[in-house]
């Protein structure tokens, strides 16, 4: 028996079964919180609104949510307090056995001793229990606050496992929160971003999205498209009796397209803020690239020698310059070579330069602009590069290289000119992240899905303006909707989930 508020009854006529099957297949039975089903008593296809929890009970999950999972939630090492948490049907039972007390009222912290199976006290702890669905994962959960330290947390973890829990995989708590309808995929990504945030701006974006900024906007479009689809379906069935609201449909799709094009136009900023602006140092061998990297990182990261061809691989580090987060890479000196290893390194250097948001083209003031520099300039000329003359403490053979004539003069050894260089970097990076408008798109995944939605809707608009009948765009709208579902994770695949949650740490 399906429960919920009846929204609409379709098709009392013959043929309802075929159509209902079509509908149910098309929408996997469920759109938003609306469920389509066939009433076998009356032969009607009905649309009802249901509680999300009810709806999710009917959705498949990965079959794993019956296990009780456990993990150490705090980072390894010595700390004042360590947290072990468990989620799943046995979590309360296991903890109560270990502390030899009732957890009592949910969400209320209690004090006790944590015992191992031999009756020895492992630690003096605080603990708390959460009852489904009012918990982070939506399942029964417990947390133990013990003394920090590798051994105590490990022993408590082992005790949970001995009593029937299993070790959680990366991101599995958050995965369950998703599967239980507590959060959508955008919010799950936001949680990862909160953990990894390295600048105030990226933290703010992530918090906004955890609190539903992008999800809300995407859901609004999704709802609107579902309405459009419903209007089209109704005109297919009752076309003879019902006026086709063609203008209304066109206007709705146009609004969605307009909204999406703004999202897409400003998406790069959110991604840059979240993942950092990439900065590649390139140049011929021995110009001082590694010396500059080390100076910028204030750390001896890369090997520096006076032998050309020292750096082979790409070496990355992260820095903050005036609040902006950069991922900076030192690369192999680019030159013609027969050395196989060096060749690969040079290919990587070129790839790094082509993908970087800003390129530092390092030049040697003791040699001046050479043929090798000419060769490199050709490779990077279309990138956002800054010409940087190094070794100005011992050389003065300069020429103008930048398009804007704004070359920078430094000494990576002495630190001379570094502030000017930083200013220049900021000048180039700022437009990439500065918000006139922020779209709250923060990952490539989100961007790619939104692009596809946009393309489907553009196609629909094109058909409509070509004068085709309205129902011809129904397939485009369905495609757009299923793409939005992928974005939110409403219509997920395991691959997609694995992809996202693999980046989490155990215990999240
Ligand atoms: N000790 C501890 N701190 C933590 C977490 C945690 O799991 N444990 N969190 C997680 O990693 C974050 C907080 N996130 C949470 C989100 C939802 C719920 C929760 O119980 N939600 C219920 C009830 C909400 C309410 O009281 O209104 C719900 O959504 O139904 C708990 C934590 C950060 N700090
Ligand atoms: N005087 C002076 N020497 C420098 C400066 N920067 C680097 N050097 C020296 O130049 C040599 C090469 O420096 P590296 O940093 O290894 O140069 P690189 O560009 O990374 O070289 P490869 O990795 O081989 O391509 C080293 O002996 C450095 O000490 C500088 O600003 N002034
Ligand atoms: K070198
Ligand atoms: Mg080097």
Image (cartoon, helix red, strand yellow):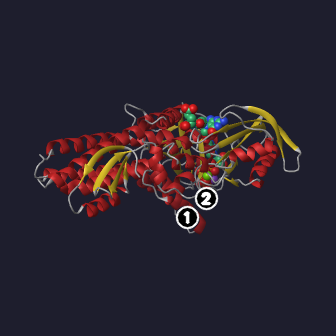
- Is 414 above or below relative to 289? above
Label located before the other in sequence (1 or 2): 2
Residue sitting nearer the eye, 401 or 225: 225
Image quadrant of ligand 1 equals top right
Residue sitting nearer the eye, 208 or 291: 208
- Is 90 above or below relative to 195? below
Quarter of the image with the C terminus in it: top right
Q: Which residue is mark 2?
A: 312
Q: Are marks 1 and 2 in contact (CB under 8 Å)?
A: yes
- Is 496 above or below relative to 322? below
Task: Locate residue 336 relative to residue 453 in the image: left or right.
Answer: right
From the top left corner, tell me how far across and down residue 86 is, in percent. Answer: 68, 46
Q: Residue at x 89, y 45 (%)?
A: 120
From the top left corner, tell me how far across and down residue 441 is, in percent. Answer: 42, 42
Residue sitting nearer the eye, 238 or 142: 238
Question: Which of the labelled discs sits on residue 127, or is there none?
Answer: none
Give the spatial CA distance, label 1 vs label 2: 8 Å
Q: Secondary structure at mark 2?
A: loop
Q: Which residue is mark 1?
A: 344
């Amino acid at each position: 028996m399906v429960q919920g508020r009846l929204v609409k009854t379709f098709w009392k006529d013959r043929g309802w079964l075929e159509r209902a099957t079509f509908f149910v297949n098309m929408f996997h039975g469920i759109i938003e919180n609306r469920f389509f089903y066939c009433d076998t008593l009356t032969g009607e296809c009905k649309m009802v609104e249901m509680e999300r929890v009810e709806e999710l009970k009917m959705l498949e999950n990965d079959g794993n949510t019956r296990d009780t999972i456990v993990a150490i939630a705090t980072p390894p090492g010595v700390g004042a307090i360590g947290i072990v948490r468990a989620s799943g049907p046995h979590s309360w039972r296991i903890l109560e056995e270990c502390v030899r007390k009732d957890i009592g009222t949910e969400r209320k912290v209690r004090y006790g001793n944590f015992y191992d199976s031999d009756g020895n006290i492992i630690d003096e702890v605080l603990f708390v229990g959460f009852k489904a669905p009012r918990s982070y994962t939506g399942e029964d959960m417990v947390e133990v606050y013990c003394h920090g330290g590798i051994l105590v947390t490990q022993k408590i973890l082992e005790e949970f496992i001995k009593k029937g829990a299993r070790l959680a995989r990366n991101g599995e708590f958050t995965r369950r929160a998703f599967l239980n309808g507590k959060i959508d995929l955008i919010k799950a990504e936001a949680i990862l971003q909160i953990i990894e945030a390295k600048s105030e701006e990226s933290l703010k974006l992530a918090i906004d999205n955890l609190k539903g900024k992008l999800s809300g906007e995407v859901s609004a479009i999704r709802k609107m498209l579902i309405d459009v689809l419903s209007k089209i379906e109704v005109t297919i069935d009752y076309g003879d009796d019902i006026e086709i609201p063609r203008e209304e449909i066109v206007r709705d799709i146009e609004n969605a397209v307009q909204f999406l094009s703004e999202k897409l136009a400003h998406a790069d900023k959110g991604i840059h803020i979240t993942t950092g602006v990439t900065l590649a140092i390139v140049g011929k061998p021995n110009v001082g690239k590694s010396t500059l990297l080390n100076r910028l990182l204030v750390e001896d990261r890369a090997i520096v020698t006076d032998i050309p061809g020292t750096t082979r691989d790409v070496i990355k580090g992260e820095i903050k310059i005036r609040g902006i987060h950069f991922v900076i890479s030192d690369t192999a000196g680019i030159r013609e070579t027969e050395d196989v290893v060096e060749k690969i390194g040079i290919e990587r250097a070129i790839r790094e330069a082509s993908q970087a948001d800003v390129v530092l083209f390092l030049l040697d003031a003791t040699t001046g602009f050479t043929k090798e520099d000419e060769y490199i300039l050709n490779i990077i000329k279309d990138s956002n590069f800054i010409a940087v003359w190094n070794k100005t403490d011992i050389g003065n053979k300069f020429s103008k290289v930048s398009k804007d004539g704004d070359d920078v003069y430094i000494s990576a050894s002495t630190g001379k000119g570094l502030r000017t260089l930083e200013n220049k970097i900021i000048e180039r990076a700022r437009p990439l992240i500065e918000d006139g408008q922020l779209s709250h798109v923060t990952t490539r995944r989100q961007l790619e899905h939104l692009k596809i939605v946009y393309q489907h809707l553009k196609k629909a608009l094109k058909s409509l303006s070509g004068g085709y009948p309205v129902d011809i765009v129904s397939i485009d709208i369905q495609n757009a909707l299923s793409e939005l579902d992928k974005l939110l994770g409403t219509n997920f695949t395991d691959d997609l989930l694995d992809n996202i949650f693999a980046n989490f740490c155990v215990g999240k």
